[in-house]
Image: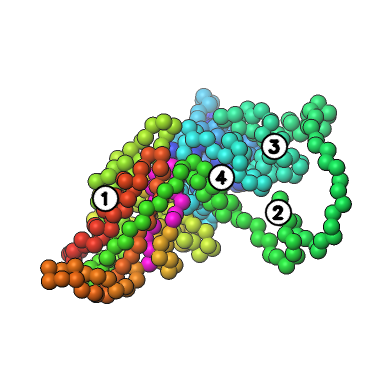
Amino acid sequence: MAIVELIMPKLGESIMEATILKWVKNVGDTVKMDETVLEIATDKVDSEVPSTTEGVITELLFQENDVVPVDTVIARIKTPGEDGPQISVSKDTPVANQPQTMIAKEVVAEVLSSELKTPPVSKQGLTGAKFYSPLVLNIAAGEGIALSELEQIAGTGNEGRVTKNDLLRYIDQKAKGEITVAQKTVEAKPQPVAPPAVTSGNITYSSGNVEIIEMDRMRKLIADHMVRSVQTSPHVTSISEADVTNLVQWRDMVKKDFEKREGAKITFMPLFMEAIVKCIKKFPLINSMVDGDKIIIKKDINIGMATALPNGNLIVPVIKNADQLNLVGLAKQINHLADAARNGKLKADDTQGGTFTVTNVGTFGSLMGTPIINQPQSAILAVGAIKKRPMVIETPQGDSIAIRQMMYISMSYDHRIIDGSLGATFVTAVAKELEAFQAKEF
């Protein structure tokens, strides 16, 4: 018999670790090829890890809630047949999607790789220069260890991160008196009598008439991603407006025939995306990211599409190689990913590899927005609601006033590499591209 090692798979280029949610199989259980062995979670998606062979599980090397680096051996499986050497599965082992628990961070989202320092996420807030896993934070909170004390613990994990074992060792040493923590003595002062208060985390509410709702896991990840983005990139927003009357009239005219012929609805999003792709080709620096003191310009144009979920959370599926799709292809891909997102059927790869993001805030009636950049991208564009407004029209015969379909376009961008001149020029170029829309065959 041979021993096959099951390795923690890598779900994306920026994902360096995953949390074990649940072992579906235990030691001594028989598994078949592609049968689910465990469920894992990353900051983007919850997935199932299938067996890469048929045999009997002989060893589980980690426990539930452990945070495990990718490419780490997590289990061993004894295969039937003659004795053979110990075999490790490829680090590119496919992972089956678990749609019922699909999650993503910002928006959505892609997170910078290990070169980008990320602040910790804790119930006390997002400060400091270290990252702490949810498991470490939960243990620290249960033991009454403050963030300032946690920051003093030397970590042995990847990039000096504090692991579960580091924290447990510290707690044990502290209990034995081997470690002392300095405490500040504060003179007690009489306090005025106040009405009953409600305390949640580190916030005390002066009135008891409140409702406290615990964030679900996806909302916590979105919150973390948004704060990290603001701390990482100096945001600047440029705004333009576009007369999209021709575009609206064309869509109204063809939408029934389009759906009948192509089996897909034609929304405004593929029209917006088509214009954005054309402008990215003219201004490739928009399609870039920062890596330390280097600028990485992405040659692939993969457009993320912020999508609201029925539970109020947000996910960003990605249209890969959007520049290689015509209008029909864009419409079908956008509809497919939007439906998959709302029905919890996105695959892990569907939220990976974005290079630029667009969000339609007009869907909810907003005229414009100042969106937060989806790291590690450098820009995100928001399209507002299309409204009829009286506008001055310049003609060779003179000026006149007409009712036109108008829309605001806003783009937030990373001022470290995109200056105001480029950001404003790009937004204006997108507006002009939409205004120049001509009726087309499909």
Estimate the spatial distance between the alpha carbons at disc 1 and disc 3, rounded to whole Å.
47 Å
The local crowd at label 1, few if under 14, some if 14 to 19, many if 20 or more residues have their Cα within 10 Å, is many
Precedes in sequence: disc 2 or disc 1: 2
Q: Residues within 10 Å of mark 2 (few under 14, many from 20)?
A: few
- Report whether residue 79 is seen: no
Report the span colored magenta: 370-385
First-in-chain label (3 vs 2)? 3
Q: Residue 40 got which mark?
A: 4
Mark 2 = which residue?
Answer: 203
- On screen, residue 393 versus residue 303, left or right, reads left
Foreground residue, 32 or 185? Answer: 185
Q: Residue furthest front?
A: 398
Tell me residue 229's x, y (percent).
49, 45
Q: Earlier in the sequence, mark 3 or mark 4?
A: 4
As helix, strand or loop, the secondary structure at mark 1 comes to: helix
Q: Which residue occupies 20% across, 61% down?
A: 436
- Kindly report the distance in space between the C-alpha atoms of the residues bearing marks 3 and 2: 18 Å
Measured in 3D between alpha carbons, the distance from the residue under mark 2 to the one under mark 1, in whole angstroms, is 46 Å
Picture quarter containing residue 290? top left
- Helix, strand or loop at disc 4? strand
Is any atom of residue 123 visible in this view? Answer: yes
Q: Which of the two marks, 3 or 4, is nearer to us in this view?
A: 3
> Residue tagged by mark 1?
279
Gap in angstroms between the C-alphas marked 4 and 1: 39 Å
Residue underneath mark 3:
148
SS category of the residue bearing label 3: helix
| Tag 2–tag 1 contact (CB < 8 Å) | no
Disc 4, disc 1: CB below 8 Å? no
Q: Residue at x 79, y 28 (%)?
A: 179
Instruction: Say which of 180 and 334 sits in front.
Output: 180
